[in-house]
Image (spheres, grey):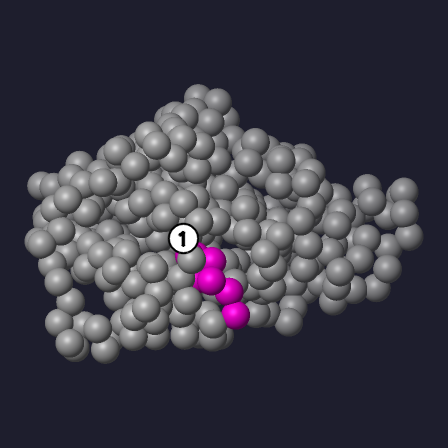
């Protein structure tokens, strides 16, 4: 991960972030593109700690772009710039309207926020239910077997409750449920329970039990995408850089059931994104020329041209998020539903 790129993206500095990412590519494309991918995944994890249910569709769009970029042999400058810009926009929303991030609440306080998911649980697993989750259940003699049953039953019951809610009339309740699920995932991970599972037999960390549960319960492409990024070249030492991608599934689970809870990009956000799309090659050339005046540029496989020829780019434009932009983060209108294309890799 590149700390400078990470810091500038979460600080919502579009200009600096694009410059750093481009310099990294120009220095060593093959090596640094992988570093950029790891950095973007870490930023997605960071965003997952605060993004709201209303903005979850925007977040999943970033996840989709990132997944496609990792699996693409060529580096498309426009796509990279747009991903960074969209992440900066979400980080700017957080800076302008800060909320408490997941992962910083003391465990004892956290318990009081999530206990309701257990107290209202009247669901028990049938034989078919046990069979469905057999790959993630610990052995019967395991000390966490009963806890695993309780967690699975609670998620099954919560999913039923979500499905009974209305996206229009019960948005506040759905948002509250999404945040409780996100905090619940944080609570289980921080309690450091041990779960032996067939889903991930080489590691007893509770993260794999939780990923298995969510994957089996929802069997959904959006969940698959988030898991793909979480597990991409995963090592234990980067767990804290990725854990927000597990937390955010609390929101994704609600979104899967109630797509109308999430909004699209608003007009001012679209304006910023469109401007980057319009001038991306001019920006890239300016950065490349500036870099080449100081360094010798190695050969690389960057796909420099992407789009129509003859566009009159604004040569002096340097995009920044304007301070007077008002985000309608709490105003959710019914979005145009568009299926995210994704090819599972695991």
Residue 204 counted in the magenta span: yes
Q: Could you tell whether 91 is left or right of 216 in the image?
A: right
| 226, above or below 185, in the image | below
User: Which residue matches tag 1?
Assistant: 193
- Measured from the top left, where is residue 17 in percent x and y? 64, 40
In the image as oriented, which residue stretches furthest toward the top? Answer: 324
> On the image, which quarter does residue 337 sit in?
bottom left
Residue 78 counted in the magenta span: no
- Measured from the top left, where is residue 158 in percent x and y? 17, 53
343 or 101, which is in the foreground?
101
Mark 1 nearby-residue class (10 Å; few <14, some 14–19, many ≥20): some
Is residue 326 visible in the rendered structure shown here? yes
Q: Could you tell whether 138 is left or right of 81 in the image?
A: left
276 or 153, which is in the foreground?
153
The magenta stretch spans which residues? 202-208
Name the secondary structure under disc 1. loop
x 46%, y 70%: residue: 200
218 or 344, which is in the foreground?
218
- Measured from the top left, where is residue 280 in percent x and y? 61, 49
> On the image, which quarter does residue 122 sit in?
bottom left
Q: Could you tell whether 287 is left or right of 149 in the image?
A: right
Q: Could you tell whether 4 is left or right of 204 in the image?
A: right
46 or 147, which is in the foreground?
147
> On the image, which quarter does residue 131 sit in?
bottom left
Is residue 59 visible in the rendered structure shown here? no
- Measured from the top left, where is residue 14 in percent x and y? 59, 37
x 62%, y 41%: residue: 6
x 29%, y 75%: residue: 134
x 37%, y 48%: residue: 188
């Amino acid at each position: 991960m590149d700390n400078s790129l990470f810091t500038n993206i979460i600080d919502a500095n579009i200009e600096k972030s694009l410059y750093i990412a481009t310099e990294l590519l120009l220095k060593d494309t093959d090596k640094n593109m992988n570093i950029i991918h790891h950095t973007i995944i870490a930023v997605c994890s960071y965003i997952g700690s605060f993004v709201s249910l209303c903005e979850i569709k925007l977040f999943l769009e970033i996840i989709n772009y990132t997944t496609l970029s990792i699996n693409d042999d060529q580096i498309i400058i426009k796509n990279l710039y747009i991903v960074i810009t969209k992440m900066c926009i979400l980080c700017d929303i957080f800076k302008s309207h800060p909320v408490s991030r997941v992962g910083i609440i003391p465990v004892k306080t956290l318990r009081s926020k999530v206990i309701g998911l257990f107290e209202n649980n009247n669901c028990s697993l049938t034989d078919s239910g046990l069979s469905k989750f057999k790959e993630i259940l610990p052995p019967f003699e395991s000390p966490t077997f009963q806890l695993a049953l309780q967690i699975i039953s609670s998620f099954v019951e919560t999913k039923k409750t979500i499905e009974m809610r209305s996206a229009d009339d019960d948005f506040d309740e759905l948002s509250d449920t999404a945040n409780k699920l996100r905090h619940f995932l944080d609570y289980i991970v921080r309690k450091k329970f041990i779960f032996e599972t067939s889903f991930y037999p080489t590691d007893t960390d509770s993260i794999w039990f939780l990923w298995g549960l969510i994957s089996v319960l929802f069997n959904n492409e959006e969940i698959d995408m988030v898991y793909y990024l979480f597990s991409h070249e995963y090592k234990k030492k980067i767990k804290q850089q990725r854990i927000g991608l597990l937390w955010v599934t609390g929101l994704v689970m609600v979104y899967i059931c109630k797509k109308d809870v999430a909004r699209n990009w608003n007009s001012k956000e679209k304006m910023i994104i469109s401007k980057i799309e319009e001038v991306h090659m001019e920006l890239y050339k300016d950065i490349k020329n500036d870099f080449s005046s100081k360094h010798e540029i190695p050969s690389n496989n960057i796909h420099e041209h992407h789009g129509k020829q003859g566009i009159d780019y604004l040569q002096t434009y340097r995009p920044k998020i304007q301070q007077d932009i008002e985000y309608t983060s709490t105003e959710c209108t019914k979005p145009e539903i568009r299926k995210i294309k994704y090819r599972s890799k695991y």
